[in-house]
Amino acid sequence: MQMSINLNEQLVLVTGGARGLGEHLVRAFLREGARVVINYLHSAEAAAKLAAEAPGRALALQADVTDAVAVQALFAQAHEHFGSPITTVINNALPAFSFNGDARPHAGQLRWEDLNQQLEGVVKGALNTTQAALPGMREAGFGRIVNVGTNLFQNPVVPYHDYTAAKAALLSLTRTLSQDLGPDGITVNMVSGGLLRTTDASAATPEAVFDYIAANTPLRRVTTPAEFADATLFFASSWSRSVTGQNLVVDGGLVKN
């Protein structure tokens, strides 16, 4: 069993990697020399453009993470292309969502369909990628699964019921999977951000909200997607080889975990 593989030897899958936070995650791993599979659903042009920046080390592949068959096909394509299995999975893909507190469904209007859409994309998506990754990770004796979470279930400053419930369920899955997969040399962790300045999802957030969060954050500013991505590297690196089942909050100190 290998306790660690250097970042520049890893084959990393970033789901929802063509834009927003996903793009920053892809760039962070490419900067460290990793090979990266850029998964996308609709953003074919953006994914291809990003992959073209690292010829030979980046590959754009389309798949709906809620479709287990499509995810299995993505893993097979990646293995064939690079000649090795995916060792590292970053579950970043987010079902269509906008961080606009004025437009969110309030308690009286919240529908199960709203919750289910997020659960399908966030939890089912992570389950599908994890299950598709297991054979290759077990073959390598090494695996890193990093789930993207949120600090909102600790500090629901804006009560996005559907999004927050799905991410809370993902944290639970993170912890139970870490218990199950530890003997295989596979670690499972979560990195949780707050509001990031700025991603596609947070573009609808009023400036006053950014200012309020910055004023209440010890660093007196809102965390950027690039800063979040850098923290994610820790869980894929050899430095975290004895860390699993954990949730690292990256929000400038707003929430104490």
Image (cartoon, grey):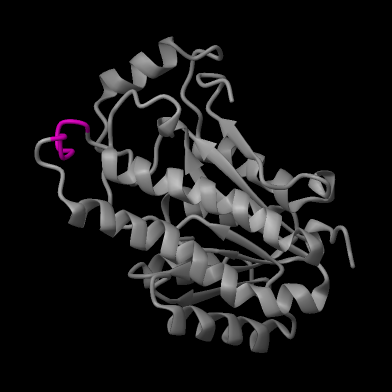
Quarter the N terminus occupies: bottom right
Can you give x and y, in whole percent of width and height, for residue 82 in the image? 70, 82
Where residue 71 sits in the image (x, y, percent)? 49, 78
Whether residue 52 is visible = no
Front-lying residue, 251 or 245: 245
Taking the spot 44% from the left edge, 11% from the top edge, the residue there is 216
| Bounds of the magenta segment | 101-107
Is residue 103 part of the magenta span, yes or no?
Answer: yes
Q: What percent of the width, then of the height, locates residue 134?
A: 67, 74
- Residue 123's quadrant in the figure? bottom left
The residue under the point 66% across, 41% down is 246
Secondary structure mostly seen in the magenta stretch: loop
- Residue positioned 71% across, 62% down in the render: 181
Left or right: residue 204 versus residue 57 is left
State the count of labels: 0
Q: Position of residue 155 (x, y in %)?
A: 41, 24
